[in-house]
Amino acid sequence: MDILKRFLSLFKRKKLNKSASKSISKSISKNRSKSTSKNILKSVLKNESKSESKSRSKNILKNESKSISKKNHKNILSNKSINHMLSLERKDFNKRESMNKFIHHQIDSYNNQKFDLRELVTKYKHRFFIIEIINNKLKVLVPNYGERAHNTIVLLAKMLKKYKIKNTILFINLADGNYFLTNDVPVFNFSVPEGNHGMIIPEFDVSNVRLNKKMDLNTLYKHIIKYKPKEILNDIYFVGSASTERKNKLRELLSAEKAPFHVDLSGATKVEMWDFKSHKYLLDLPGFKPWSIRFKFLLSTQRPIIRVSLHNSKYSEHNFWHLWFDYLLKPNQDYIQLTYDCDYDTPLSDELYQKIKSDILSTYHYLEHNEIAYKKIAENGFKASQNISIDESLFYLYTLIETYTKRCSEKPIN
């Protein structure tokens, strides 16, 4: 603890100036074809003195494992810049302001259009799960009998007990993908890539956790926090299904890798979420579409999360697929964000796969030799997870629907 206090106090005396902070955040937001860490590195190095840059590089290279090849040094140095950011205290931010910006950004994707929501019901009754809210009561106009539909209704019912909503109609896409074919109907999705139109509602497992149906989100968090593993394996862990087998094959390719990778495709239902704490590093990998419902749970394990995201610029996807709680998180401070532009519906090229694998290994090797950075990102992620609660999801959902009704509905619904 004394070492950590001295480390943090040192950085408090040597804070980055405002222009440096802006350039760093700007470089993080441009995670397209280039790697995240390379952009961060350039902005950091421009604002550091030459003497500081040299001394830090020497310390990092001394601690690196001999097994790492020279080809990976660029990635290692990139992670140095991530560590530089993590070593600073995670500053508080205005949660409500961030949420409002996040919501308005989603609705802005419809270019200030107004819709006759009642008229759209007939047109899209075969396409979406459609719910009407009249006098603060739910009515299903177009039913769906799947588990996702049921859990979405449960969450909406909880929200209506707590908040009063204006009369409205919701068009909900229950599939993994997002509806982007046209923008003549405002659609709620579970995830939307940056650049596509659509709104984001909390995933279907917030009110009823899929791995254990007796638990909601808050209860599961308590179990994860209380759990103390007998031993912690030094590996990069992921467990799930082979959902990318007919797509990009990323999960399948990583499952064939040797240690420190430990990618198990036998099915996540065999492993309780708190058992993830038995592993030192956790992977969040894309599923059938490039997003994962487990990400919010992983943050509470107090382990560094390496989030691998894919997006396709040919589909006008400018960045990774966002989830409802992303406004509460800071990439590369609360978790490590690795983003790649590719056609995720087809097998990855060998070149891109090797790049992804190399970036994951570089992050692993760097954090292995930088205990302060390891603890800092694990701590930041855990603190952020405390904001991702049922109450927060209900308030977010209420604000999203109210804003949507105000900005998108052409006339009042009677």
Image (cartoon, rainbow, N blue to C red):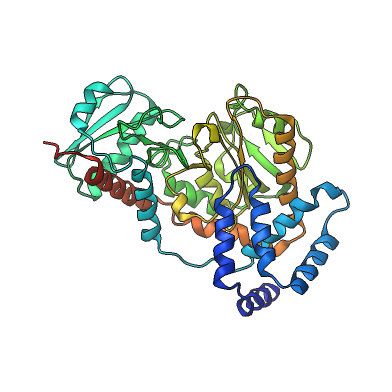
Task: Tally the marks.
Answer: 0
Q: Is residue 196 left or right of residue 251?
A: left
The answer to whether residue 82 shows anywhere in this view is: no
Residue at the spot x=32%, y=26% of the render? 128
Q: Is residue 382 left or right of residue 114?
A: right
Tell me residue 267's x, y (percent). 60, 29
Tell me residue 263's x, y (percent). 68, 35
The answer to whether residue 172 shows anywhere in this view is: yes
Residue at the spot x=57%, y=50% of the render? 30
Tell me residue 231's x, y (percent). 70, 50
Relative to 49, residue 219 above or below: above
Residue at the spot x=59%, y=61% of the render? 24
Q: Is residue 312 left or right of residue 323?
A: right
Pick out the residue farthest to the right.
66
Pick out the residue farthest to the bottom.
13
Q: Camera-side residue: 410 or 363?
A: 410
The quarter of the picture where the C terminus appears is top left
Relative to 332, residue 235 above or below: above
Pick out the residue farthest to the top.
126
The quarter of the picture where the N terminus appears is bottom right
Q: Camera-side residue: 372 or 99?
A: 99
Q: Camera-side residue: 366 or 24?
A: 24
Pick out the residue farthest to the left.
414
Residue at the spot x=42%, y=28% of the render? 175
Tell me residue 52's x, y (percent). 75, 72
Relative to 213, residue 303 above or below: below
